[in-house]
Each structure stands twice: as C-alpha cells, then as structure tokens.
Amino acid sequence: MDFDFSDDQTSLRDAVRRYVDKDYDFEQRRAIVKAGGFSRAAWDGLAGLGLTALAVPEAHGGLGFGPVEAMVVMEELGRGLVMEPYAQGGLIAPAVLAQAPDAVQADWLPRIAGGEALVVLAHQERAARYRLDVCDTLATADHRLTGAKSVVPAGDQADAFIVPARAGGAGAGIALYLVAKDAAGVALRGYALHDGSRAAELTLKDTPATLLVGPDRGLAALEHAVDIAIAAQAAEAVGAMDRFVALTAEYLNTRKQFGVAIASFQALRHRMADVKMQLELARSMSYFATLKLNEAPDARRRAISQAKVQLGQAMRFVGQQCTQLHGGIGVTDEYVGSHYFKRLALMEMQFGDSMHHLGEVSRRMQDTAGVFA
C-alpha cells in the first residue's frame, strides 16, 4: 500500500505547519492559556486557512475533503499544541450535520465552513463512564431537552451543541439534537483543563432544540462521530509525540556531562530507540484508524478501539520517557516539553482510556479469538 501523501495533501500540511510556527508559537499559546484556554482570533486563523471548510460538503461552501486530509491537519495542530477544538468544530460537527434535514444543513454548514459558527459535541455524562449508550438526558415529543453534559470542549465559547438525548423518555432510543447556546434553559460553567484548554459543564432545562438524527439512527451517528474524534486525536497525538521526541533528541545532543553530550551515553540511546519505536507504532495505528473510518460500523469500531489502545500506550510511554530524559527541566512550566506531556496525558483519557478500549477490543474479538479460530 502506498502511504505517500499526494501533492495537495503535502501542500496542506506545509500550510498548516507554517501557520502554527508563525501564529501559534509557545509564547502565544501561553498567552491564550492565561486568557482562559480559547482564542477566537486563533479560531479565525484556522478558518482563514480554510480548515473549518475542510470536511464540509462542497454544496454548502466547503472543500469536501476526506479523512486523510483531516489526519494531515491534525498532525500539524498536534505538533503545535493548538488548543482550539478543531476536530470538534471542523470535523465532527460537519459529519453529524450532514445527516440532518436539508434546512438544518443549509442553515449551519455554510456558517461552519466560514468559521462563523463553532458547534461542538456535548455527549459525556457523569454516570456513563465512556459508554455512549448510557444517556440520562431526556427529550420531549416537541424537542425540549432536560439533562446535563460534562467536559464539553470549549463549551462556554461554542455557538451551539450537538446533544444526544433519549427521545420520548427513559428507555427510549437516543436521538441527536442541536441546541443553540442562547436557547432558553441553557446554563454553562466554564473551566480550564489540565493542559490549559477549555471545557464546560452544560445544563439543559426544558431547552428547545432542533432534531438532527432520529432515535432509529442516533446512537449509530453518535458512535461514528466519536470514532472520527478518536481518529483525529490519534493523528494529533502523533504530531505532539513527534515534536516532543525531536525536542528530546535536541536536548540530549546539547546537554553535556563529563565533557561530552549525553546523547553519546548508550543507556540513553537505548531509551530513545524505544521511544522512537513507540512513536512509529502510534503513527501506523493512526493511519490504520483513519483508513478504517469509512468501513462498516463493526469493523470501524473495532479498528478505532485497537488504535486507541496502542495510542494510549504510546502516549504514556513517550510522554514519561521524554520528560525523564530532560531531567528537572522537563517538569517546569516554563519549558515547552512539560506542556506536551500534559497534553498527551489528557488525550489518553479522552473518548475512553486505554483500559476501556482494551475491553472493547476484547469484546469484539470474542467470535474470532482462540487457537481454532
């Protein structure tokens, strides 16, 4: 299989890298963290590059690109530790809204493509523990929602939310709804996450909403949305790890002990070899997850969980090893490496941690596991 990128994909990667290097360096990122963890100016910068239009169909003013282009973009955003929720607003929202009624698509997709509207997925609930089929938010027959969602990405900065809710009461099927931020009954409490990015608690009380996907397809659409998020996050993690490994190699070649660069010490060279191996394993599984996004649901979900397990192991190993190889400076807030470590640690727990997805892989292999399979 040919894993070389096309000329267009290479040009896209280079454009995003130039933007990150110029307009999202470490000091600019620190300023965004101090300001709360989200910058509308940075979001407008992503829109100016055309990234918010990347996954929007051409019929609604978008570029209509696919998962590979999204992966290319996410790697570069991960390399620069970009905190704005691009995967949420630029990849997940268009995928869900593309399944909505035509009038809803015509209303929201052009605004998403132009960067005028940030729509994020608000699906997590306190009792769910990563399970997508656990949902206590309820919707009435006239599409009024009551419930609470947790850790909504940039929730207090978003313009609207994609909210799963049980259509018709407890035990009913899960449907997906669009809730505007300024709708009646919406309450938000924003806060910063461990890596400096922003999230919010969302409470809905008899809040009017717009039906996107009915209860017959709602759970399947939610699973697909989360799989897109995991594949995007895998690419982001590869970009972050790639940059963190490069920083560590540079440090080892610069730091001297006993009159020589510590990169010449055999024990440290062996550790860096193990780090590089984990990075390449993560990269291959990121490609695997991206290429499986258009497969049938069962094959797609199994592949995504397999990728999340490998990425989780790699993120933990690379983050810990690179931090330790830096010595004391590796955990200081003034050094960029510590921020890569925090970002990797947070991503390992989002959309299901490694143990959760290991269980998913095991459950989906029961029919084929064993010596005689």
Image: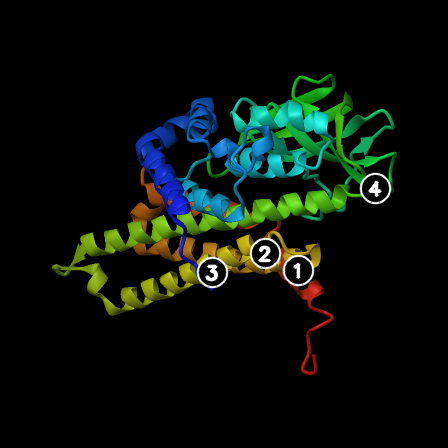
Type of the residue with mark 2: Lys
Tell me how far mark 3 sits from mark 4, CA to CA. 36 Å
Front tag of 3 and 2: 2
Tell me the crowding category of disc 4: few under 14, some 14 to 19, or many 20 or more residues within 10 angstroms, Cα based.
Answer: some
* Amino acid type at mark 4: Gly
For image coordinates 64% across by 30% down, the residue present is 201
Q: Find the residue positioned furthest to the front.
A: 59
Residue 73 as seen in the image, left or right of residue 262: right
Q: Could you tell me which residue is drawn at 53 percent across and 47 percent down?
A: 67
* Residue sitting nearer the eye, 241 or 114: 114
Residue under label 4, please give it: 173
Query: In this rendering, is residue 161 above or below 251?
Result: above
Total count of labels? 4
The C terminus appears in which quarter of the rendering? bottom right
Mark in the foreground, 4 or 1: 1
Answer whether labels 4 and 1 touch (C-beta < 8 Å): no
User: Marks 4 and 1, how far apart in space?
Assistant: 23 Å
Residue on which the image places disc 2: 292
Identify the mark nearer the N-term, 3 or 1: 3
For mark 3, what is the residue? 284
The mark nearer the N terminus, 1 or 2, is 2
